[in-house]
Image (tube, rainbow, N blue to C red):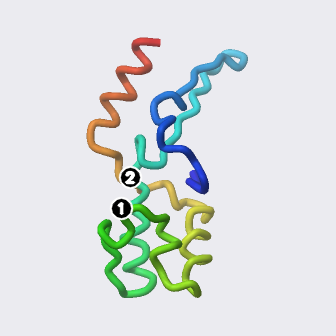
Amino acid sequence: MTNRGSDKRLNAKETEKTRHGSRLIIAVDLDEVLADTVTKRLVRYRADYGVELTRDAIFGKQIREAVPVEQSRAVEACLDESGFGRDIPVMQGAQLLFATTLCIN
């Protein structure tokens, strides 16, 4: 679920359906398409460091670029932690968009 270097312009085009045996496999770009990873990471930063990091502070940057250098590695490492993605908020309207995409295809 990491977002390192991904191109946000791909968004819904990342959704892909394929058949694998009798299972339907769907690949979806979650970061800021269906899953609000920025909100999750800002909440996590506040919990870890006791500092409020706002969307304005990270505008036009990666979160790792908006924090002190000594915290940047840990800020990125949390993305790879087991269970990090379990409670990421869903982007507004994403469930409807995803359901519509599945029905069209």
The kind of residue on which mark 1 rests is Thr
Quadrant housing residue 94: top left
Per the rendering, the mark at residue 63 is none
Asked if residue 28 lies left or right of residue 91, the reply is right
Residue underneath mark 2: 36
Looking at the picture, tell me which residue is in the foreground, 59 or 70: 59
Residue at screen point 56% across, 54% down: 3
- Where residue 33 sits: x, y (%)? 42, 42
| Disc 2 element | loop
Looking at the picture, tell me which residue is in the foreground, 79 or 61: 61
Residue at screen point 36% across, 64% down: 59
Disc 2, disc 1: CB below 8 Å? yes
- Where residue 24 sits: x, y (%)? 60, 21
Quadrant housing residue 45: bottom left
Q: From the viewer's perspective, is residue 93 above or below residue 31?
A: above
- How dense is the environment of label 2, judged by Cα within 10 Å: few (below 14), some, or many (20 and up)? some
- Where residue 57 sits: x, y (%)? 34, 73
Residue at screen point 35% across, 76% down: 53
Residue at screen point 55% across, 60% down: 83
Q: From the viewer's perspective, is residue 11 above or below residue 66?
A: above
Per the rendering, the mark at residue 39 is 1
**Residue placed farthest to the right in the image?**
21
- Where residue 14 sits: x, y (%)? 54, 31
The kind of residue on which mark 2 rests is Asp
| Disc 1 element | helix
Tell me how far mark 2 sits from mark 1, CA to CA: 6 Å
**Residue placed farthest to the top in the image?**
104
